[in-house]
């Protein structure tokens, strides 16, 4: 949903204006490849998916029948299909922690901290690991008598069934998510903070502002667009969590998310039509949430000097 | 959390790509006949297989060489697919899914003629091969299994003996009591669910037919309004799983189980019992040997229920092999299929039950024969209907969610109790029947 969009915005290269001829073609030539990729791998499948959502296709048969809005009616008359969104609340809560921690580390590491590059590397590192590998690593981490239990034991805390306890499983999984994505948020924030002109800090320091005041009145307002972007990504991410729970629990034991449920409808029960409708609904929900958020917190242009 | 947005896009893509090139012209429905003169068959055929291990260790290459001794002009290529079900399912939407392949479980029986070439009339083939009725549509057979597997518990004899149990339990209650004895007298975990990997749990669905010893057990589901009512097979089977977990006779945390690791656990006697198929015995003995234990400690016992003084074990076909209906080399493909099932010796090498009629049972099922266990083959007259109800109800008797939910409720991780679960399943089943 996000990568190809930026590809579409590749800034046009300076056009070659030879003989006053076809100068307007040049930017489109540069765009040809990214646009072709965008259309082939994002737009066409989405169009296809929307069209399947109006059929009773089972995912295998060469034939399918048009059934109108039957899949959508089916979807909305089964409230239990939407109950899985409660699970998203855990990830939403986790993303608050994630953004908070990322802001903290970004701010601390923007100042002259000892070994700051090492810490930056350490905190960003989890994001570079493949999601499947992360799932497997944490499977061992959470095992009864595994790493986490052993460490807690030193402090006298009892062992827990981190993935086995239905009240704990989503917190554990959301924790993995924080571990994995916090570094990315942090790097985005550091990038934004570095674009703040240093004389602003100097001026603030001369006026006697503390570190917290500098953060509150200089840094936070300057990087607001990036924070707002992170929040949008966090919310849409929480609604469509997939990788980590799918690998670690397969959606069992109260950890099923909407996307896992959709996959099961499509590939376990051969209801590709219904699953496509569910995917379309998820897309609409994400768009709606983003729109409401933009409405409540509009982006203002930030003046920095 | 940004990645999850990409993941969601991935789902969208998977759903979208799944059907590119959906509708195509009607393929010919000529029978894939075996050639009469082996020396004249020409062509290159591609065989899709889930046995990536056999691709890697050269077993299949050896088979191809032996095959070429009889069919010198046929070149056989293999494509090993790790995610066989997922990959082939999507490739079925194109014409490019090899010449010979195993039929993925997700293809409903009535769609076999769309994808696979007929291999011959059922009346003829059923004389030579078992299980042909699992792939028969309109009197034509579309797939032939290489092996069948009997279902039962793989168990560690030494542990059971240490607990003082030497006879196979004959009722579910006795089985539970035996597991309790194992828990009390040995340090072993009496039962291992393999909940996390999920697919080993789906073997519980294969127990259908064992308690009642009824070959029509599966077909009867088409009309049974409440298959989970007391006394019904599914009730007996699922109750056994439920009680085992509920009485804390299984591993402490089912969410972190590991299939590969479980083999060593059973082999070394840290785990006493697992419900699987006869195919698993060889692997468990291997694991026992690797761990320095006696491979003969690994045994196989039938479902703990008797009918007229006999245990019953349902024998089911493994993957069925078929010829792509779009294949340009049908005679060569059919030649490979016949050779693989009849001459390769693959079934014997794996100590499996060959589907070729009249072949002797493998050695690891000798105790079953000695104890007079009845091997039953389920009839498949109404498989299509049962499949349809199963999918419509979203129960998935052969999917992992269904036994996983039973385990969750049994260990108190999900709300409800045994009766509630069964009532819910009954309701879904009868609703789906009514909706047809």
Image: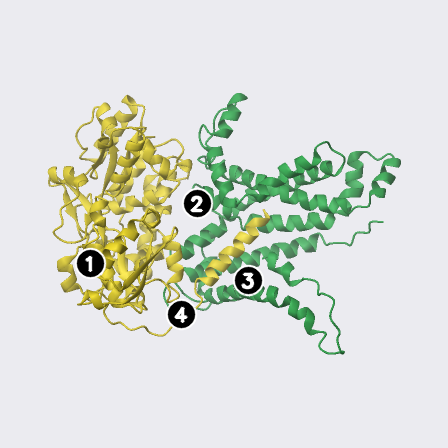
Q: Colour of chain A?
A: green
Q: With respect to residue A261, does B436 lie above or below?
A: below
Tell me the residue that label 4 is attached to. A65
Viewer-side residue, B199 vs B420 = B199
Q: First in sequence, mark 3 or 2: give its number.
A: 3
Residue under the point 23% across and 49% down: B346
Residues at marks 2 and 4 on the same chain: yes
The quadrant where residue B356 appears: bottom left
Residue under the point 49% across and 27% down: A149
Tell me the residue that label 1 is attached to. B132
**Which chain does the yellow colour mark?**
B
Residue under the point 57% across and 47% down: A238
Tell me the residue that label 2 is attached to. A250
Q: Is residue A296 visible in this depiction of the protein?
A: yes
Q: Position of residue B44 (x, y in %)?
A: 31, 64
Disc 2 versus disc 4: nearer the observer: 2
Q: Secondary structure at mark 4?
A: loop
Q: Is residue B218 left or right of residue A17?
A: left
């Amino acid at each position: 949903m996000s990568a190809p969009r930026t590809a579409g915005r590749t800034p046009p290269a300076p056009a070659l204006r030879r003989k006053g001829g076809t100068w307007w073609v040049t930017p489109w030539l540069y765009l040809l490849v990214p646009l072709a990729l965008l259309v082939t791998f994002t737009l066409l499948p989405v169009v296809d998916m929307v069209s399947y959502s109006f059929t009773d296709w089972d995912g295998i048969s060469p034939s399918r029948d048009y059934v109108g809005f039957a899949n959508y009616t089916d979807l909305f008359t089964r409230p239990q299909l939407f109950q899985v969104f409660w699970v998203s609340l855990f990830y939403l809560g986790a993303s608050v922690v994630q953004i908070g921690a990322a802001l903290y580390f970004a701010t601390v590491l923007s100042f002259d901290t000892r070994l700051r590059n090492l810490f930056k590397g350490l905190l960003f590192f989890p994001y570079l690991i493949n999601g499947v590998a992360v799932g497997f690593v944490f499977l061992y981490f959470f095992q009864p008598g595994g790493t986490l239990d052993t460490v807690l034991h030193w402090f006298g805390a009892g062992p827990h069934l981190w993935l086995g306890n239905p009240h704990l499983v989503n917190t554990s999984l959301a924790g993995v998510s924080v571990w994995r994505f916090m570094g990315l948020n942090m790097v985005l924030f550091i990038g934004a903070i570095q674009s703040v002109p240093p004389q602003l800090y100097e001026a603030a320091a001369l006026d006697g502002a503390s570190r917290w005041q500098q953060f509150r009145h200089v840094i936070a307002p300057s990087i607001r667009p990036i924070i707002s972007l992170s929040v949008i990504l966090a919310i849409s991410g929480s609604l469509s969590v997939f990788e980590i729970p799918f690998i670690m629990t397969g959606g069992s034991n109260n950890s099923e998310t909407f996307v896992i449920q959709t996959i099961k409808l499509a590939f376990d029960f051969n209801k590709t039509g219904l699953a496509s409708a569910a995917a379309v609904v998820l897309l609409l929900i994400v768009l709606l949430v983003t729109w409401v958020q933009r409405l409540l917190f509009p982006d203002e242009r930030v003046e920095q000097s | 959390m940004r990645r999850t947005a990409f993941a969601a896009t991935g789902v969208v893509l998977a759903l979208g790509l799944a059907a590119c090139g959906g509708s195509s012209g009607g393929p010919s429905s000529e029978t894939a006949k075996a050639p009469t003169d082996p020396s004249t068959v020409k062509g290159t055929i591609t065989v899709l297989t889930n046995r990536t291990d056999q691709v890697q260790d050269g077993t299949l290459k050896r088979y191809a060489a032996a095959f070429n001794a009889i069919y010198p002009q046929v070149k056989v290529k293999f494509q090993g697919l790790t995610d066989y079900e997922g990959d082939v399912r999507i490739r079925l939407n194109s014409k490019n899914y090899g010449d010979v392949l195993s039929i993925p479980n997700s293809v409903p029986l009535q769609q076999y003629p769309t994808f696979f070439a007929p291999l011959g009339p059922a009346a003829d083939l059923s004389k030579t091969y078992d299980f042909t009725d699992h792939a028969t549509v309109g009197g034509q057979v579309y797939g032939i299994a290489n092996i069948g597997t009997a279902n039962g518990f793989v168990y560690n004899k030494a542990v059971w003996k240490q607990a003082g149990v030497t006879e196979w339990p004959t009722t579910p209650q006795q089985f539970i009591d035996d597991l309790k004895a194992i828990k009390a007298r040995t340090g072993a975990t009496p039962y291992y669910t393999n909940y996390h990997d999920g697919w080993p749990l789906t073997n519980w669905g294969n127990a259908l037919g064992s308690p009642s010893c009824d070959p029509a057990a599966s077909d009867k589901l088409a009309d049974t309004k409440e298959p989970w009512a007391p006394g019904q097979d599914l009730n007996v089977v699922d109750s056994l799983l439920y009680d085992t977990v509920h009485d804390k006779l299984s591993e402490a945390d089912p969410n972190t189980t590991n299939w590969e690791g479980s083999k060593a656990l059973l082999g070394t006697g840290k785990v006493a019992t697992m419900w699987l198929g006869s195919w698993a015995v060889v692997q468990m003995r291997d694991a026992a040997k690797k761990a320095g234990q006696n491979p003969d400690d690994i045994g196989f016992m039938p479902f703990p229920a008797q009918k007229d003084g006999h245990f019953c074990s349902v024998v089911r076909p493994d993957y069925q092999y078929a010829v792509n209906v779009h294949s340009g080399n049908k005679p060569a493909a059919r030649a490979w299929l016949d050779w693989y099932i009849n001459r390769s010796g693959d079934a014997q090498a794996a100590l499996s039950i060959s589907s070729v009629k009249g072949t002797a049972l493998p050695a690891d099922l000798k105790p079953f024969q000695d104890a007079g266990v009845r091997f039953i083959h389920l009839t498949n007259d109404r498989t299509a209907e049962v499949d349809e109800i199963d999918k419509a109800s979203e129960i998935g008797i052969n999917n992992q969610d269904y036994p996983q939910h039973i385990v969750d409720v049994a260990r108190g991780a999900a709300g409800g109790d045994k009766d509630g679960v069964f009532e819910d399943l009954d309701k879904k089943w009868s609703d789906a029947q009514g909706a047809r």
